[in-house]
Image (tube, helix red, strand yellow):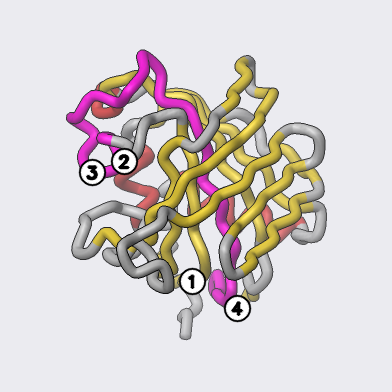
Amino acid sequence: MAGENSWWVKGTLFENCNCQIVCPGHFHFTQLCTHQRCRGYWGVAVEDGRFGSLSLAGVKLVIVFDSPQHMASGDWVITTYMDHSLSADQQLAMETILSGEAEGPWKVLGRFIGQRQPTIRETIVFLVEPKSLSARVGNFLQSLITPLKGRDRERPVLLENNYNQIHAPRQELGMGSTRYEGSGFSLETQDTHALQSNFSWSGSF
C-alpha cells in the first residue's frame, strides 16, 4: 500500500514503434534504431494503484514518442494522451509520475526527454482479446497488436530477463500496425516491433 508520500501502479504496458522486430532501442538506448527517427507509442492500462491516498485504478493513457535513431542522444519529444474519465487529481498524479518528479522509472527516462507537449484529454479505448490488443485515441491514433507465432502456437514468444526501465522483465513479443496523426508528425506502421508486459512501478514524492 502507498504511504502518504509514496505511490505505486501496476497493469498492462504495450508498445509499437516503426522499428523492425525487435526494436534495438528496446534493449539499450545506445543501439541504433531501424530508421533515422524512432517513432511509436506506449499504451498504459492501470489495473490498480495509488498516489498517496488517491486511487489510480482504471487510468488509461497513451504516450507518443519521437526520438533520434540513437536514443541515448536524448532530445525525445513526448506527447501524452489521457482518457476523459480521469479526474483532475488523477491527471496531475500521472503527470507527476511521468515527469520523473516522483522518482521511479520515469525519473531515469526523463533525462532523455527534450520536449514534453501539454497533456491532451481524449477518449481512449483499449480492447484486450486472446489473440490481439487494440488501442484507439480519439481521431489521433488507431493501433492493433497481434502476438508473434512461436513453435508452440499456444504460448507467446517471450523476452525473458530483459532489463528495461518501464517494462517487466518478462515481455510478450508481437507485431503492431498503427496509424497516428498529431504532435507535428504522422506515423503508419505495418507489422513492426510491438510487445507487452505486466508492469509494476513505484516511487515517492
Checking the image for residue 10, the label placed there is 1
Q: Earlier in the sequence, mark 4 or mark 1?
A: 1
Q: Is residue 12 left or right of residue 181?
A: left
Q: Amino acid at mark 4?
A: Ser
Residue 147 spot, x, y in % from top left? 47, 56
Q: Amino acid at mark 2?
A: Val
What is the C-alpha distance between the residues marked 4 and 3?
35 Å
| Of labels 4 and 3, the one closer to you | 3
Label 4 sits on residue = 53
Q: Label 3 near label 4: C-beta < 8 Å?
A: no
Q: Label 2 near label 3: C-beta < 8 Å?
A: yes
Q: Amino acid at mark 3?
A: Phe
Label 2 sits on residue = 22
Q: Main secondary structure of the magenta part?
A: strand
Q: Quadrant of the C terminus?
A: bottom left
What is the C-alpha distance between the residues marked 2 and 4?
39 Å
What is the C-alpha distance between the residues marked 1 and 2?
24 Å
Q: Please give the count of numbered marks on the rendered protein.
A: 4
Q: Amino acid at mark 1?
A: Lys
Q: Residue at x 44, y 68 (%)?
A: 198
| Of labels 1 and 2, the one closer to you | 2
| Of labels 4 and 1, the one closer to you | 1
